[in-house]
Image: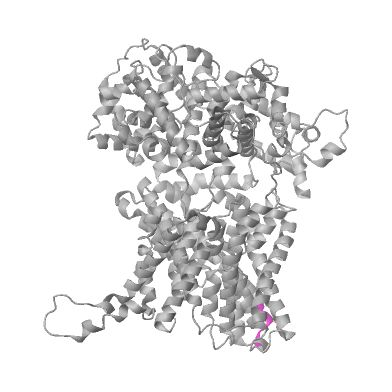
Amino acid sequence: MPGRGAPGPGWGLLLVLLALGELPRAQGVEEKPGGAHGESQGFQVVTFKWHHVQDPYIIALWILVASLAKIGFHLSHKVTSVVPESALLIVLGLLLGGIVLAADHIASFSLTPTVFFFYLLPPIVLDAGYFMPNRLFFGNLGTILLYAVIGTVWNAATTGLSLYGVFRSGLMGDLNVGLLDFLLFGSLIAAVDPVAVLAVFEEVHVNEVLFIIVFGESLLNDAVTVVLYNVFESFVTLGGDKVTGVDCAKGIVSFFVVSLGGTLVGVVFAFLLSLVTRFTKHVRIIEPGFVFVLSYLSYLTSEMLSLSAILAITFCGICCQKYVKANISEQSATTVRYTMKMLASGAETIIFMFLGISAVDPLIWKWNTAFVLLTLVFISVYRAIGVVLQTWILNRYRMVQLEIIDQVVMSYGGLRGAVAYALVVLLDENKVKEKNLFVSTTIIVIFFTVIFQGLTIKPLVQWLKVKRSEQRDPKLNEKLHGRAFDHILSAIEDISGQIGHNYLRDKWSNFDRKFLSKILMRRSAQKSRDRILNVFHELNLKDAISYVAEGERRGSLAFIRSPSTDNMVNVDFSTPRPSTVEASVSYLLRENASAVRLDMQSLEQRRQSIRDTEDMVTHHTLQQYLYKPRQEYKHLYSRHELTADEDEKQDKEIFHRTMRKRLESFKSAKLGVNPHKKAAKLLKRERVQKRRNSSIPNGKLPMVSPLHDFTITEKDLELPDPEEAPSYDAEEMSGGIEFLANITQDTATDSPSGIDNPVFSPDEDPGILSAVPPWLSPGETVVPSQRARVQIPHSPSNFHRLAPFRLSGKSVDSFLLADGPEEQPHAPPESTHM
Amino acid sequence: MGSRSSHAARIPDVDSIRRETGFSQASLLRLYHRFRALDWNEKGYLSRVDLQQIGALAVNPLGDRIIDSFFPDGSLHLDFPGFVRVLARFRPVDDEDNGNRDPKEPEPLNSRMNKLRFAFQLYDLDRDGKISRQEMLQVLRLMVGVQVTEEQLESIADRTVQEADEDGDGAVSFLEFAKSLEKMNIEQKMSIRILK
């Protein structure tokens, strides 16, 4: 990401340019050009027009500095693993601000509310909404709302009132403030900040429920903050004694208007956005633009209507994600993903850096020790009390209890951030007399929460969880079965329906299927809405794409059709060549792998040098290659990382296995379980397939016309645009399966042997299989996906993985080979070509 | 919860199921809804296909085996009591369960041994009470990424069996299985908080 990150924020800053127009003159650099304007004789070959480019230039420079700093931070893994990036950025900002101040003698730069609210915040919130784990979010919506609404009101009220109480006691000395000012301050300091929370929580790995609660709260409390802020600001303007009950009632009403209105605006724009992306088939190139422009419009629209803009853009992202992802092309989806991450990440970087820079301004500082310290104490204490009280209530209704540790993390994770800062800067000095005190205190609070709490929360979480009493190496059995238990547990969770709310969810998904999807999704996308087929469809698309890419790499697709020699290599295991390759490759692999895990291994070795190394290798193998259980890898939301490829890969891998196995059991058991006719059809096709396959004489190349083969290829080529591949989507149910069948048949043409993979066959008799070489066993042939086959000839590492088929007659599934060279760090490089 | 319990009456044999499984009324009701939702064409029972429709199971390496364990002895229908009975294994172990349990009553479904037994039968496909090397290998193959070679898998399977095998018959009996995991907190590891 850093590489992308560096030039990245430029896009967003095209917008910021406009906003930063009012940016005051920058430091040092721009003093030089003075001379250029002095001379004015005739035509200048080269002119130096600093003022012409000044503002955008400075902005671009800031972005560059921030991005470079980010690269710098990540050079040292040690630092970033201990100190959160946000804290580092603030410190960097302080330093830069100091330099600017020293050079210029006035603080030239600060984070203005306009820039923040119009240009920096929207990408962050949109990103949060668009990548929101919906299921988790709505599953915990009640809890999130309680914390966001009641919790924020509680924080604001208690903090404001307590400060006022202390002020009355005279501890703060002489301040020109009233009760309403304190409540106003309380309301702006109460809200947990989405930017800060994410920046820190991303690095603290807490469980998903806890994460979504804190994260959701920080997003949804915006409405409350906005309303409280507006209400108290108007009250302050009005003057304390003129506030009537009617005004209070209006305040409460406005809360509902602001929050529900904001949400509604977001949903409406999400609807529009989904609808628009349905028709972008011929303008693929600007497809991603719609996502950004329309969601930004939702933000601006609700801002215009003085509704909660954050809620609007959050819900726009949440609601549109499903349909947009289904509608836009694969490439556009990638573009959207990366652009969004880039913008959000860039905006976040700039926010934190400018928070630091803004703090270096002697004009805003007004210190009042009692006020600052008490604010810190009150916000921490009341947050903790509020969390405990609310959790106590919630736990009576929640299926998944929030435990003590969770509550500690939630209390401690209540970070304040740039939203509070921007709000406090917005205050009118004429109305709020002690604005500077509020500003300084807010800055202190932000720095304290982000830097101190951000630094300590990770050790705290680790310390709280320290239940591991004994430090012993788990035995092989424990390791293996332990992992099996994890899988079992997650399966049972899936079967028993996880968190509840199933009834509502079912109702919603019915509604969605019957109406919404019909309107908002392309027809082709609707057809593959079935979750399983959806995944399968995606896998096949990827296969097909890589197939085509491979063809392009070679200059033609001839390799698919002609059983050329290098294609033969792929299946011709009878020559001695692969085995020698295999030996060397496995050697290489082992070497590489141990290099990667060097420190891990050396640690192990030091601790237990007696242990036989083979055993260790076994442990490592298990450690590294055992599939991870769902809970462990399922990504929640990360601003800086896109979902890890590893997980997708694992999903794919298992999915292929499962589907093939199910197919096999269809075939072998001929179960008539499936009631609908599509399945019956499928079954029939399978039988036909089987007959065809088993009619292949052993060991001989089956005669299937190349022409037929070619048509299959063509079909594959069309897959990237499903709209134009009616044959693929013709039958909802059998689409994916048919593809499988095609593969099977397809491979039968160019592979005399096929590959017997017991993983995919019923579990009965691997013993027999291992005794009989695959090309002699008459049974079904199941093959790695096309992707695998396509790449097989290139890298010897493939042989390494295929060779065991030959030796043992069994295989591990090898369809993943396509990702071989790039995605597997331990695979030998391409240079080992033959 | 009071208002919901009226619905619970709709579940057939609700009382005997409760007694057997130890589920709370609310959990049973929730599971009943789930059961009905999975049974999308309202057959009154679940078939393998119904469970296979759950997307997440397709990416669970043991998914199909777990589905199979809902259909003991080759049956094709899964009724609600059977459904709940399997899930009852994963009910967390309460303190009260152990405290005032009548020793004469059968072991509750969520006991440590029953949890282990559930896992064991996922391995022991031929139901001979032993996990053979071959059976271990099959499970390994399901659970390990494709990068691992067959030889490695075999050697892992050998080692795993050897490690647990105490009587030297080259297979892991249930007792050996339980013994090899005695240090593990099965009660906690094989429980789901939501299944109370």
Q: Image check: A794 left or right of A266?
A: left
Query: On the rendered structure, is A593 left or right of A142?
Result: left
For the point 69% across and 34% down, which residue is it?
B87
Vertical position of residue A713 compared to residue A258: above or below: above
Eyeballing the image, is A697 above or below A159? above
- Residue at x-position 57% and y-position 66%: A451
Front residue of this view, candidates B7 and B82? B82
A472 or A809: nearer the viewer: A472
Give the answer, above or below, for where B136 lies relative to A698: below
- Give residue A73's position: percent from left, percent from top: 46, 60
Give the quadrant of residue A366.
bottom right
Q: Position of residue A104 (x, y in %)?
A: 40, 82
The quadrant where residue A459 appears? bottom right
Query: Is B10 in front, or is A768?
Result: A768
Which residue in the rendered view is the most extreme toward the top?
Answer: A697
Q: Tell me if residue A402 can be seen.
A: yes
Task: Give the magenta-colored segment's residue range.
Answer: A242-248
Q: Nearer the viewer, residue A685 or A329?
A: A329
Residue B160 position within the rendered picture, expressed as x and y whole percent measured from the top left: 61, 25
Q: Is residue A416 left or right of residue A581?
A: right
Magenta: main secondary structure: helix
Q: How is the image coloured?
A: one colour
